[in-house]
Image (tube, coloured by chain):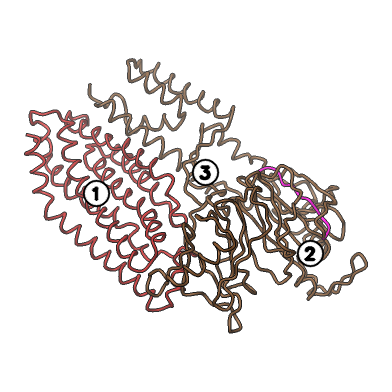
Chain colours: A brown, B red
Amino acid sequence: MLLLARYALMLTAVLVLAVYVPMLFDASFGERDKKTHMFYSPVLKKFIWRELVVGTPPEGEIEDVHHAQYVQMDQDGNRYTRRDFETMLPFIYYKNMDVWGLLPLELEGQVFDKEVMRDERQVMELKPRQIAGRSPGDGVHPLIESVPDRAGLVFPEERFRLDQAMSFINADFNVLDREKSIAYTQALSEEGFVFPGRLVAGKPTILKPFDEGVFLVDHAGAVFHVKQVEGEPWVVRTPIDPAIGVRHIKISENSRRDFYGLLLTNDDKIFVISYDNYELIPLPVDNYDPDRMDFKLIVNPLYRTAVYSDDTVIRAVAMDSEYTPIDSYEHVMAGATPTLAEQVFSYIVPFRVDMSDPNTGYAVLRVTTFGVNSLIAIGMALAAFVAVALRTRAKGRMLALDGVLVAFSGIYGLLAMILAPRENVCP
Amino acid sequence: MLKALLLKEFVKLRAFWIVALVFNMCMLGYVYITMNGLFRLDHAEVVWYRVIHLGQLYYSSLTYVPAVTGLFIAAVQFFPEMRNQRFRISLHLPIAPHLIVMGHVFVGFLAVAVILIIDLAGLGLMTHTRFPGEVVARALTTAAPWMLAGLSTYLGATLVLLEPTWKIRMLNFAVAAGMTGLFLRGGVPGAYGPILPILCAALLIYTPSVLLPAYRFRYRRV
């Protein structure tokens, strides 16, 4: 019983240490934004990026004192000041370009003023935590009136859930709106919707230029576009092939009305859903893993750029306005290189337990080891354990069990032993 | 004998338990007023948007209530026992010390757990009056780790109070505080859902540790 009590406390201590020691380390030595920001420059016709300088930068490399921790460079190794970097990306930094008097700008025989640049740009992101099932979901969704009888969009009084029917619940009374539920369920059934539904995708906010309703995926995998138009259901069964295996759809209304949003499939392919009869346009992204990688599609009047990255590598594909790939690039992010502090830390602790993960909205208890360094950390902890055991001439079953604990938990186990010293425990 | 011991603890804690229950009921009442206040100040659909989509927690004032409850019950249960080392008398009763300690802990743990279950039920019921089932489920998932924090605090406070030496008492305090902190890390509403079973298991592993200081106290390992 005593043994049980002692190891119960020590195991708890190991868990607590493995969570809080790394947390304390991150708070003390953590770096700022470690991700590289990559773009395709329509001026240079090259990939260009901005990233954190790790370690001591070479002499003369940093010119812009205010942003001394960052470096801007292109794929040929040329470095840029912050201002030069921004002028290489006129569609992104068009407001600065305007302030600097560099607009209108002539590129590839076309002239772009501030208004055109503003109206013709669009950015869509898809982060792992935004994918259905990777964060706690809303469960009930609004269907906003797409043709409101006023200037702006208005929140509807109902939200709907999609299961065996499309059921609307009135927020004022928290009761089912039978009439509306039947109307929409029937409208969907008439178009061939197979209940229960699988996925609801929309942008549930009124802070958008207009409303495109929601996209629903039925039990058979077919994609339906549903809107409320002047109080009535408006349902379209899209020609998107149910066999494609839709995993997630992200909708974002944009005044360009070029595409509704992004569609991700179960086999990690990503498409834009065109306004042209819901045609799916594939984005040529090799090695894209939606569960680990942030994805971004940057649209400007001349090019489309797909940028996607995990913690180590950032990849980018530049496309023309028809989404035909013209160039691609891959870069190991400087921020991925462990700092000196991180290297030292990996020799001290054998593992870390994290309770949050940027790739999911859920809390986790994720154990991360540091490869060979973890073994060295455990070796050092074991050596200390044996040295103390020899010096104190300790022996017995509890000593052996302590040894096992240290062999699995390294320095955490050693520290836990201070909490429950063997000699202080009665026989 | 064990039955008599449990009865003694029940009688000892009864009045304090009612105080703790009243405190929890007052907090639930406050949450109810807060929730209804939202609907008075804004249209229902806007309140739904804020709660469902933006993750507004009208019950955030409940976050630390279980922890305070656990601390209170442990304090009123074990402070008197440790004064003048009274607990030593109980520990010399002719039953195994671990049964005596676990008997005490069982009663206290149950006292805290019953209050926390009432808290969860209250939160669920009041949410149900204004929101759809999805929101009720998410509110319960959000508040569940806070309730576990209450149980963790009870165990942690017991661990600290039973320990006879100051040095180890401080170390126990650090572990206890760290353990309770694991349940209160925040995140988006409902984030703890998938790891609740693992955290329950961790709490179960943690439970027997309160025997260690009790043994040290019983055998004067000071």
Residue appearing at x 18%, y 36% in the figure: B101
Which residue is under mark 3? Answer: A25
Comparing labels 2 and 3, the label whose residue is closer to the camera: 2
Which residue is under mark 1? Answer: B113
- Pointer 3 indicates a residue of which chain? A
Q: Residue A116 is drawn in which quadrant? A: bottom right
> What is the crowding at mark 1: few (fewer than 14 residues within 10 Å), some, or many (at least 20)?
many
In this view, the residue in front, B131 or B8, is B131
| Left or right of residue A75, residue A237 in this image | left
SS assignment at label 1: helix
Residue appearing at x 45%, y 43% in the figure: A20
**Residue A377 — which label?**
none
Q: Amino acid at mark 2?
A: Asn
Residue appearing at x 26%, y 46% in the figure: B154
Q: Position of residue B177 (x, y in %)?
A: 35, 46
| Left or right of residue B98, residue A262 in this image | right
Q: Amino acid at mark 1?
A: Ala
Estimate the spatial distance between the alpha carbons at disc 2 and disc 3, rounded to whole Å. 41 Å
Which residue is under mark 2? Answer: A300
Estimate the spatial distance between the alpha carbons at disc 1 and disc 2, rounded to whole Å. 58 Å
Relative to residue A272, is residue B129 depicted above or below? below
Relative to residue B62, is residue B30 depicted above or below? below
Q: Which residues are magenta?
A: A311-321
> What is the crowding at mark 2: few (fewer than 14 residues within 10 Å), some, or many (at least 20)?
many
| Left or right of residue B172, residue A283 in this image | right
Q: Position of residue A124 (x, y in %)?
A: 68, 60
A317 inside magenta stretch: yes
- Pointer 1 indicates a residue of which chain? B
| Left or right of residue B24, residue A341 in this image | right
